[in-house]
Amino acid sequence: MLKHELNRGESPKHRRHWRHLKDSFCSSDLGIASFRLMGILVLCLGGVGSAADSTPHFKIRVVDEQTGRGVPLVELRTVNQVRYYTDSNGLIAFYEPGLMGSRIHFSVRSHGYEFPKDGFGYAGVALEVQSGQSARIAVKRINLAERLYRITGQGIYRDSILLGEPAPLAEPFGSGKVAGQDSAFAVPYRDAIYWFWGDTAKMSYPLGHFWMAGAVSDPPGKGGLPPARGVNLRYFTDAEGFSRPMARLGVKRGMIWADTFATVTDEAGRQRLVCHYAHMESLERMVGHGLAVYCDEREEFERVLELDLKYRSRFPAQAHPVRIAHENGDYLYFGDVFPTIRVPARLSSFKDLECYEYFTCLSDASTPNDLQVERDSAGRPIYRWRRNTNPLDVSTEYELVKAGKITVQEARFVPRDFDSGKPIQMHRGSVRWNQHRNRWVMIAGELGGSSLLGEIWYAEASQPTGPWRRARKVVTHDQYSFYNPVHHDFFDHGSFIYFEGTYTATFSGNPEPTPWYEYNQVMYRLDLDDPRLKGVRE
């Protein structure tokens, strides 16, 4: 019986494969016993791997019906509730003992995409799952932005490799032994792109490290992949190959969350990489903060200034600075979403709080419990740059509108939904200059909406400080967070812009984190020539 099973190969190559295994195992009594056991397992499993020259998997490719490109993060669920998710090529390598050769119904579901429903309301398709065969499923994109690929974590192109399909990454299963990463930052620095993330999870234990991870990649056209294909990350790693801390800063307890990554010029005219950091005791309690500079020799950040906690609001979390030229030199502009803080792009200025200016309409008489708006003789709010005060953040201006102290028409940072006219409270994001539109463009999340932190919006303005009048939703998630988005303007190409965010069940109330994708970064691109964005322009 064993001999009969081993000779069931479908090709001479297959039979040679099994003869090689038999010869190798049968060189000892233990090998003979092991080989007999293998034969029994093959029989019990119905001939697993019986076609060595072809995949035992059934290939399912899910594509965007608009572009024909594979769609990552699409869920296919069987009737008995087994879930599968497309990889970054939009592929699923399906193999289930006992189901191959059967007709299987898959429910089809994905954030921002839809699949037609049948007469009973089921959005799905029945497929004949045969080893070595394939099927193609086209989904309709509702999002204006197109989901491209997962950037971080493990198994990015897992199914592609199982199916023998090409993958663009040098490490298609993921690099740095990273399981998940929170909140991305990226800045071009000294002929490379430097990437940083917050809390980083690993595969070997539920807790990873909490002191900022880092990696570098080559710019597109200079050794790097086109942004539509992916990002080849080279992590800074420890002796075990796991992503190592980039900003430990001597902290023994607690977390380091860094932001405001930017390049400045030092006294010798050299480019330096800087950031702001927060020392967190918990998710809510900050016990210290300050400024740090990257040491190229040690390949880590070093503290250069510790700040009093009373200045914490002057460095909003997750800020992504933009460099703007002035007559007297470049400035860094940044804020929680919109740039309401600026400082000369010099290392000496970055370390001197007297050099910072803050954009606000609040008067000197304002207090945290009694906000007062400064107005001109005509009764209009006066927005201006001031020193030694606090910046006007998005939430404060939104509260001014809700309290009736300014109208939504007077506000500069409360855009309205183009379709409904409803004011939107933005929640973290970035503002960048876009040459194609010849405008400043915003990519930001929303606090609230159909998913608490899962909605991403686009807006335009003639100045970085606004006014930002209208916005369109470009990405939506169904009870799932996609927070702290950032637009990578160094990837801009023609009418396309690229942005990423953190995909996680955290804060969403969803009890089912998505396998592989949970707590990782996902890249999108948006075509600014999409006619649905036309109404956003003033």
Image (cartoon, grey):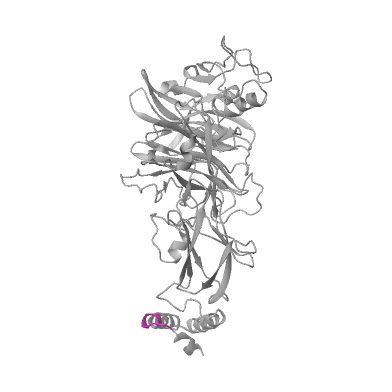
- Tell me how many marks there are: 0
Tell me if I can see residue 249 in this picture. Answer: no
467 left or right of 12? right
Q: Position of residue 417 (x, y in %)?
A: 57, 36
Front in this rendered view, residue 406 or 537: 537
| Residue 117 against residue 417 in the figure, above or below | below
Q: In front: 41, or 317?
A: 317
**Residue located 40% across and 63% down the image:** 165
Q: List x then y, in percent, for residue 518.
A: 56, 51
Q: Is residue 525 visible?
A: yes
Magenta residues span 9-14
Question: Does the stretch in magenta take in 184?
Answer: no
227 shown above or below 275: below
Reply above or below: 163 against 326: below
Q: Position of residue 399 (x, y in %)?
A: 64, 26
Q: Is residue 416 above or below residue 532?
A: above
Residue drawn at 56 percent across, 11 percent down: 376
> Residue extending furthest left?
222
Determine whether, in the image, residue 255 is placed left or right of residue 292. right
Where is residue 264? Give x, y as percent. 39, 27
Of residues 73 and 249, which is closer to you in this image? 73
Of residue 135 and residue 513, the one placed in the foreground of this image is: 135
